[in-house]
Amino acid sequence: MNAHTPTVTVGELPASKKVHKPGQLHPELRVPMREISVHPSAGEPPVTVYDSSGPYTDAMGKTEIERGLPRLREAWIEARGDVERYEGRTIRPEDNGFVSADRVTPEFPVRNRPLRATGGRAVTQLAYARAGMITPEMEFVAIRENLGREQLRSKLQRDGESFGAAIPDFVTPEFVREEVARGRAIIPSNINHPESEPMIIGRNFLVKINANIGNSAVTSSMAEEVEKMVWAIRWGADTVMDLSTGRNIHNIRDWIVRNAPVPIGTVPLYQALEKVGGIAEDLTWEVYRDTLIEQAEQGVDYFTIHAGVRLPYIPLTVDRVTGIVSRGGSIMAKWCLHHHRESFLYEHFEEICDICRTYDVAFSLGDGLRPGSIADANDRAQFAELETLGELTKIAWAKDCQVMIEGPGHVPMHKIKQNMDKQLAVCGEAPFYTLGPLTTDIAPGYDHITSGIGAAMIGWFGTAMLCYVTPKEHLGLPDRDDVKTGVITYKIAAHAADLAKGHPAAKVRDDALSRARFEFRWEDQFNLSLDPETARAFHDETLPKEAHKVAHFCSMCGPKFCSMRISHDIRAEAQKEGLAAMAAKYRDGGDLYMPVENSTESTTT
Amino acid sequence: MNAHTPTVTVGELPASKKVHKPGQLHPELRVPMREISVHPSAGEPPVTVYDSSGPYTDAMGKTEIERGLPRLREAWIEARGDVERYEGRTIRPEDNGFVSADRVTPEFPVRNRPLRATGGRAVTQLAYARAGMITPEMEFVAIRENLGREQLRSKLQRDGESFGAAIPDFVTPEFVREEVARGRAIIPSNINHPESEPMIIGRNFLVKINANIGNSAVTSSMAEEVEKMVWAIRWGADTVMDLSTGRNIHNIRDWIVRNAPVPIGTVPLYQALEKVGGIAEDLTWEVYRDTLIEQAEQGVDYFTIHAGVRLPYIPLTVDRVTGIVSRGGSIMAKWCLHHHRESFLYEHFEEICDICRTYDVAFSLGDGLRPGSIADANDRAQFAELETLGELTKIAWAKDCQVMIEGPGHVPMHKIKQNMDKQLAVCGEAPFYTLGPLTTDIAPGYDHITSGIGAAMIGWFGTAMLCYVTPKEHLGLPDRDDVKTGVITYKIAAHAADLAKGHPAAKVRDDALSRARFEFRWEDQFNLSLDPETARAFHDETLPKEAHKVAHFCSMCGPKFCSMRISHDIRAEAQKEGLAAMAAKYRDGGDLYMPVENSTESTTT
């Protein structure tokens, strides 16, 4: 422990216990879930929820930031016998942006020699899936996605519109394998990030969310970024992208990856640009390639690669209202234009695949030409690039690389579905990973909301992972509060999408919370919510006393006007008399009582 | 001015000027709009936006809370020659919930004798519309809805999916009249609320939002509620509902109505219940009827009437997860059940119509059986009531009363459209006015967001007015900050809906803000946003200096990684060379350059 070691937020969430479920094919698996217990008066079992927060929320777990997390997957990786340890690349001054000695972020204290595939093999989950192997990662994911819903078999209600997705009642390890083999889902799992708990991104699984963190040249530090990562997953981020730019980029990333139980994504171009002093024209394939290897050795699980920003598409952006708004996209466009050459990412794409298959780094094919305003949505530039991403997907798949596709951006509601439909059509059902989309441009400061609307909709339509947008979007770098707001907003969007798609058991949590609400179990209502702290604080602003936590009203309506309280009276009255008899009487009654059955059946649409 | 006079927020919004446009049929009209000016370097005219904030944001206007607003419509009303002044009902102790002298909210200092229709006439905008009259209210609304888009004729783009709405390029006074005459739109305008600036609620007009305010027995005061009203309209609320319960309800409402430039809605049942000591069973038609007249004389513009909660529907709610969650609905259900009688609201509905037509109070037919949880969405109870609301609509229309229909509630995304479609079908296209809907139950503390998602969608599908939900929903009474957050969230939802429906000129503000963003006109970006204060504050957290307001980057990406900055470089480079030539070269080029036209056209779906 030294003065530089970041402090992170640890501890269980209220009324929550981390449990671990074993595997069957791989009995050594310990798949984490969170059980939220409810008051004994409810007579209900705990509610099991998906838990991406890692050991930080485990009362039994110990985390030491300067040592990193336990290397959960190491034995699984080595057991496959297709990797070797090697010295790895030497860290160079440019890796940290030539930072001066007095401003350098300390190196992470532990150095592990990296692994790589032997003999040109693909060590990707896709390669294993195609070979018919069910890896521990795949079984882990299957157990994790089910959330114990085997036990709810009798209660499952398949009620939703999935737009052609193929969501099973129960996720089996074999189903996971099939989906990965078909390229419809990915399990980002760099062999050099054995600390990560496997998770899956695909249309037939729970909708996931990504949180972006990372410093910029203007603000933030390593300690802040590590805490942002831990904080983001505490509230439910499924993956985290480190979008750091500026100096110290290598060392900051090391601290993040070694302490991340979730997959970490990056945009390698950002670091490559730092290595050439921020001059886009000076980028070369060699610098970029070297950066890919550097990051693959560190354990980055997915790379955003803007290989679809092709030279001929750049003129298509010139009449746009907001030009090119992707950082990576604009850098590549500038390079292409300056050199009057096709993008080196496009030209060297197969070599990039060769690197990715050596470490199992998944592709996140970047949408460098995504629209940055309502005016530019669904234009030729955007869709030309998307088609190229479809081509590149086939190339990556041929190399056994895992692929997902990034999507927009700023899109009004009536143009959202076209994005999803086109992506499914041209990218062979590779998972879609969208930023928002933002459904209007007029609310900077609230773009978590403008985009949360679009995210919920596109998640329903089939997007597999939603990249969050924070309230600071367009205005500044998000701080810790912004990260939390962004994550909670996107958990809402993802869950609303799961409900609408008809994910089995998605409604279990809604129903448990609604019952708690109806029965005035205030503590349960807080604990079952996405953000128990905020729910409790809001309640306590007006009714702070402990006695109010069992009160049959709140300050919104007060006791006399509490509809739920009155509903209980109604229910009690109905039970006194016998509900069936009462209903019968109403139906049989005189002129006063209209026949219920007829009145409702005749006009139900 | 005395110690009790509330202080309200006044003053123009940044870079904004209130302008007033005259009428043609009624040249005396002064229709308010807000012009947001942009930096001269943009070379652009000001952006005109809808302005519901009244004289409080008029630099030239003077507001004195203890005198009330100018009585704008008084001359128009009197000129129609169909009303008379009369003494009005005497205020009684029960009107303020038998409040003790030491706790009474002072009476509003000015008392105007109320107006009523003479000779059993209907003095409603619907009656006038049917008679072929274009009232000043109708022309006012037409001018207001257009926002000067006559001048944008050449720029209008009709790009949207309106699901069968009939949105015109320009709103004429005659179009307003027709829509009102057909019952497809309402102009809430009680003849005793002449302070209100006419506005319209209908599917073929801009989507509107309502903000709920009001004290409860547990918290809040008159001064707070008046300021909440002024604050809500400052940020864009189009109507305000005063949902006060508890004591002082009459006097608080007087202060609100006399100072409200927007229509005020209430749920008269709340006050009626206070008059009978909070015992639902003790309610009588006579008490209720007296309350309607009391509030109609005060100037309430629309009444929520839960006349669709019929005795035979109550058994349908008993197996629900959350029973009856509407306050009014639960009160009526309890009354019905206790007396084993049909609802007195249903039985006396025609008499209610007679009161409403005497003052032009619009109906907001309440959805007392709306679902309070995802589990209860779209159930038999809900739709049985909706069908009854359809029946009641016809009765009210036969009496020349204006009607809108309230809608849910808690509804997952895949069940939202069914609500809209069924409402259109059974209620003869009367305007729909929905609360949210909330698309999941699991996020108390964030229900402005869970519901903002549903609100944007149902607004797109055709809902005419969206009732906001604040972050405090389910947890407590909203304070001033919550009101603002709720209003801004719902302005986002309404605007996103307008964009998606293809409202002419809706995109003008998005485009202006996006151009400001692209051109690093930071001040313009703040000023054009829904909440300039927050946008500026967020920006200034990391880059507070004035110099940064013209910087070609922000702290999010820093200068080197600013995609927009790079886009400008690209554009400059393109212009140097001649964009057309460049594009041609790319198209004609060798193997390196793929033919753009073919590549995009071949796969555009």
Image (cartoon, coloured by chain):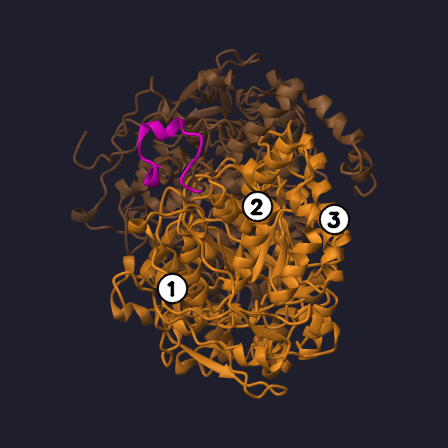
Chain colours: A brown, B orange
Which is more foreground, mark 3 or mark 1? Answer: 1
Image quarter where the N terminus of chain A lies is top left
Distance, label 3 to label 1, CA atoms, is: 43 Å
Residue closest to the eye, B48 or A228: B48
Q: In the picture shown, does residue B428 fall above or below B114? A: above
Secondary-structure class at tag 3? helix
The chain containing the residue under callout 3 comes to: B
Residue A468 disc label? none
Distance, label 2 to label 1, CA atoms, is: 47 Å
Residue underneath mark 1: B108
Residue underneath mark 3: B422
The chain containing the residue under callout 2 comes to: A
Q: In the picture shown, does residue B539 fall above or below A422? A: below
Mark 3: amino acid = Lys
The first of marks 3 and 1 along the sequence is 1
> Magenta stretch?
A540-556
Q: Position of residue A578 (x, y in %)?
A: 67, 20
Do callouts 3 and 1 mark residues in contact (Cβ within 8 Å)?
no
Residue underneath mark 2: A456
The chain containing the residue under callout 1 comes to: B
Secondary-structure class at tag 2? helix
On whether residue A549 falls in the magenta region, the answer is yes
Q: Position of residue A548 (x, y in %)?
A: 36, 30
Distance, label 2 to label 3, CA atoms, is: 23 Å
